[in-house]
Image (tube, rainbow, N blue to C red):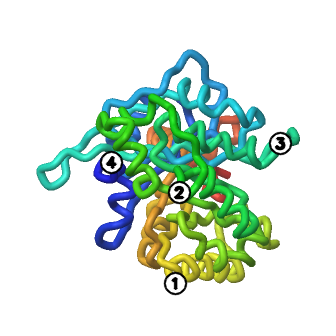
Amino acid sequence: MQAANRLQRALRTGSGLTFGAWQMLPGTNHARTMARCGFDWICVDTEHGNIDGMKHIKLQSAAPITLLILPYLPQMLQCTKLLQRLQLAICQRRLDGKAYALSFAVIVPVATRTPTTWTEQMSTHVGALDAGAHGIVVPLLYTPDDAKKLVQFAKFPPVGQRGFGSPFPMEKFGGQTSAEYLLQANDSLVTVVQIETKEALQNVDAIAKVPGIDVLLVGPFDLGNNIGHPILDGNMHDELKNAIATIHKAAVDNGKKTGIYSTSGDQARQFADQGFHMVSVSADMIALPSYLTSALSSAKGSYVHSALNLAKGAVSGAAKMTGPYGR
């Protein structure tokens, strides 16, 4: 089962470095196109992306996939239905003469506008796992107790309290039997927590000590907002950089992996050189407008010509990306 979970396998071998991308736009062909670009994993973002409202779409997988869930739905109890309607396409590519399945990570948003109990929130994660997720990503953690409760819902007994009975996840791991899934899931599924609140930063060492947590993922934009140093011009304040370094050290010191969201290949390379393991490279809603704007600018011939068109109301010139998904 672990062999089918490409992300988990990569995190536990060699340097553990993986590169991925954020998918915010819906569609199977869209997912396939991103997959063929050579990433190790794709994170399907239903927190900030335009994916959670999709209809008449079913969960598909032509090969084992890794689904990581980052919760935030107003309809917290509809995660299984959402995943069943979410179109995921898997692309196989050859590395060293062997075929490997791309890992997909699905982000299901968790802070909600309507009152919900922790049990209702955690049911979102369980529904995702029961639908075939290879892991879950949980945003907006605050305390070690939050992390412990997450593990309880994500793991089968005796480690946790996850209920067993879904007939769907086995096919996402190469057609395992129910018994094989039950015996191997606790060790094979990836459990990721996002450190992006002031409270989580203060408690990061204790959170990193929680058994069953695999990766601490830094959300630099929300983290910057929550510690009083938002990223407004594409540059990080030194205190934000120090906070990110603190999170990375806490994870490594406690035998855990670290992940981080970045907005460009250059930034991703910097984080990789700093020792991060699960590194996003870009998002479709960064890459698509950036490339199209640049291509249009080139087609118009010159920045002088572009400036003239801009004065007429045309859009031209590549804008600097400053926010998590654009300017």
| Mark 1–mark 2 CB contact (< 8 Å) | no
User: Label 4 vs label 2: CA separation?
Assistant: 19 Å
Residue count near mark 3 (Cα–Cα under 10 Å), binned few <14, some 14–19, many ≥20: some
Residue 219 - label: none
Q: In terms of sequence position, does the residue under pointer 4 or pointer 1 come before the other? A: 4
Coordinates of residue 237 in the picture (x, y in percent) = 70, 77
User: What residue do we see at 62% from left, 82% from top?
Assistant: 246
Return the residue at label 4.
Answer: 1
User: Label 1 vs label 2: CA separation?
Assistant: 26 Å
Report if residue 116 is visible in the image.
Answer: yes
Of residue 231 and residue 202, the one placed in the foreground of this image is 202
Q: In terms of sequence position, does the residue under pointer 1 or pointer 2 come before the other? A: 2
SS of the residue under disc 3: loop
Return the residue at label 2.
Answer: 158
Q: In terms of sequence position, does the residue under pointer 3 or pointer 1 come before the other? A: 3
Residue count near mark 2 (Cα–Cα under 10 Å), binned few <14, some 14–19, many ≥20: few
- Disc number lying in front (2 or 3): 2
User: What residue do we see at 57% from left, 41% from top?
Assistant: 163
User: Label 3 vs label 4: CA separation?
Assistant: 33 Å
- Disc number lying in front (4 or 2): 2
Return the residue at label 1.
Answer: 253
User: Label 4 vs label 1: CA separation?
Assistant: 28 Å
| Mark 4–mark 1 CB contact (< 8 Å) | no
Coordinates of residue 70 in the picture (x, y in percent) = 62, 49
Q: Amino acid at mark 4?
A: Met
Coordinates of residue 66 in the picture (x, y in percent) = 43, 46
